[in-house]
Amino acid sequence: MLSVDSDTYILWREDNKEPFIFAGIGNAEEVEDITPVKIIWTFETEIFPDEISPSTTFREGTVCKVSVNAYERNPVVRQKCIEHYGATCYVCCFNFGKVFGELGEGFIHIHHLRPLSEIGEEYEVNPVEDLRPVCPNCHAMIHRRSPPLTIEEIKALLLKSAANYSAT
Ligand SMILES: [Zn+2]
Ligand SMILES: [Zn+2]
């Protein structure tokens, strides 16, 4: 699990009482042999956290402390982004809490705007400038092309189809 260049399921929680949050499939980039062990994780896969089947099992206790470096899955920056923008899709305004009530409350994907190729090693994500909350539909469409569509491009497509829709 501490070997560099191997995929590991990363789970994260604030303290021992909180349930684990799945952060993604991480790659240990840097391991510091201190107590608790410090690991810098990188996340390269385009897997959304909710795409992982609930039947996937994780061994509890394998991760002591992690410095998560997952722009779209980091729970801390995620939370800050949602606090700023709300859990409403930045593209189509869909809000899971409004539609599904309690069940959907707070559910949203987070999209990272900056292409990974433009990011230097010293990069620290800014939850307000670099991230936007998006619904899974819009998020999937954004990532259907590589490089991903910009927010403006995906919004323009949506507006165009909405205009066609109302015209017919
Ligand atoms: Zn949307
Ligand atoms: Zn994204």
Image (cartoon, grey):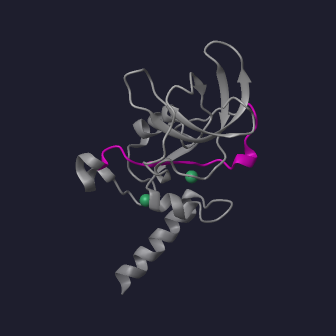
Q: Which residues are magenta?
A: 104-122
The residue drawn where x is 64% and y is 50% is 45
The residue drawn where x is 49% and y is 35% is 75
Where the C terminus falls, by quadrant?
bottom left
Q: Considering depth in this image, is 118 or 71 the residue closer to the camera?
A: 71
Image-based side of 168 in relation to 38, left or right? left
Magenta stretch encompasses residue 147: no
The percent position of residue 19, horizontal first and vertical second, equals 39, 31
Q: Ligand 1 is found in which quarter of the picture? A: bottom left
The percent position of residue 6, horizontal first and vertical second, equals 71, 40
Image-based side of 165 in relation to 39, left or right? left
* Vertical order, 40 against 107 (above or below): above
Magenta stretch encompasses residue 110: yes
* Vertical order, 90 against 84 (above or below): below
The residue drawn where x is 70% and y is 47% is 116
Residue 153's image quarter?
Answer: bottom right
Where the N terminus falls, by quadrant?
top right
Residue 36's image quarter?
Answer: top right
